[in-house]
Amino acid sequence: MAERNGRLDGKVAVITGAGSGMGYETTKLFLAEGAKVVAVGRTKEHLAQWEGVANVVPLCADITRLEDVERIAGEAESRFGRLDCLLNIAGVNDLSYPLEATDDERWDRVLETDLKAPFRMCRRAIPTMLQGGGGSIVNIGSYAALRGNHGPSYTAAKAGLEGLTKSIAFAYAKQGIRCNIIHPGGMNTNIGKTSGGEYHEAGKKLSKIVQSMPVNFYGQPVEIAYACLFLCGDESRHINGAALSIDGGMSVC
């Protein structure tokens, strides 16, 4: 375990998807580095692990509901009086359903969760960040956004999220707000299991293609957490609008 240096002392973060995977590891690391965290998740069972932990407020919420987005930001304001870091980590997978098999329900569910919800979270968080003198937003994209080798809904959502990231970075840079996006490759998380079913046959074919790549394409969630820590810390204060691939080299294949 790396030495902890208090790199986030005094900072307040909202982290979505905090019940498992990348969100869980990021929450744990941020707490260890001195941050206070509103840990957001969809299920009470996953959030139970944060009950009673110092400096964390576990909050069960649905990020696709506008009233819950308001409640999340309000919790940071009322509990801690500020908001310095927003990490939009929660997401769903389209299970590699191809275009002709993607109905409106699947399209809407993925776009609502992976693009519209981060848009709403950013829109609500930025005024609070401005009051505190600035902040850092980290969005979690996907390798799929760079290569188009997933279903159309997931690929479109994550590509759109990069566009949103760059727009925010441009618009608020002079006001002290930075916005960056991380594109993970294959990660050892349960996103497939929580996305509502089995992978389409097209996804199974994709897996064979990925497995043939000459890279170590599967990473661990903590590796994303360390990148989030860097992008929210003072060491990265001149990094804004960047897209960081953490994929073991998948995006160069």
Image: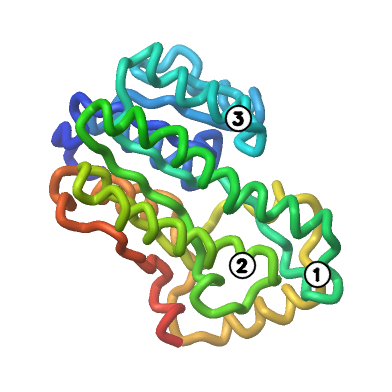
C-alpha separation, residue under disc 3 versus residue under disc 2: 28 Å
C-alpha separation, residue under disc 1 versus residue under disc 2: 18 Å
Q: Residue at x 46, y 57 (%)?
A: 164
Decide: few, some or many residues near mark 3? Use Cα within 10 Å; few <14, some 14-19, many ≥20. some
In this rendering, position of residue 26 left or right of residue 64: left
Residue toward you, 171 or 141:
171
- Label number found at residue 200: 1
Q: Earlier in the sequence, mark 1 or mark 2?
A: 2
C-alpha separation, residue under disc 1 versus residue under disc 3: 27 Å
- Give above or below for 79 relative to 227: above
Amino acid type assigned to the residue bearing label 3 in the image: His
Q: Residue at x 22, y 42 (%)?
A: 175
Which residue is disc 3 drawn over? Answer: 46
Q: Secondary structure at mark 3?
A: helix
Which residue is disc 2 drawn over? Answer: 156
Q: Quadrant of the C terminus?
A: bottom left
Amino acid type assigned to the residue bearing label 2 in the image: Ala
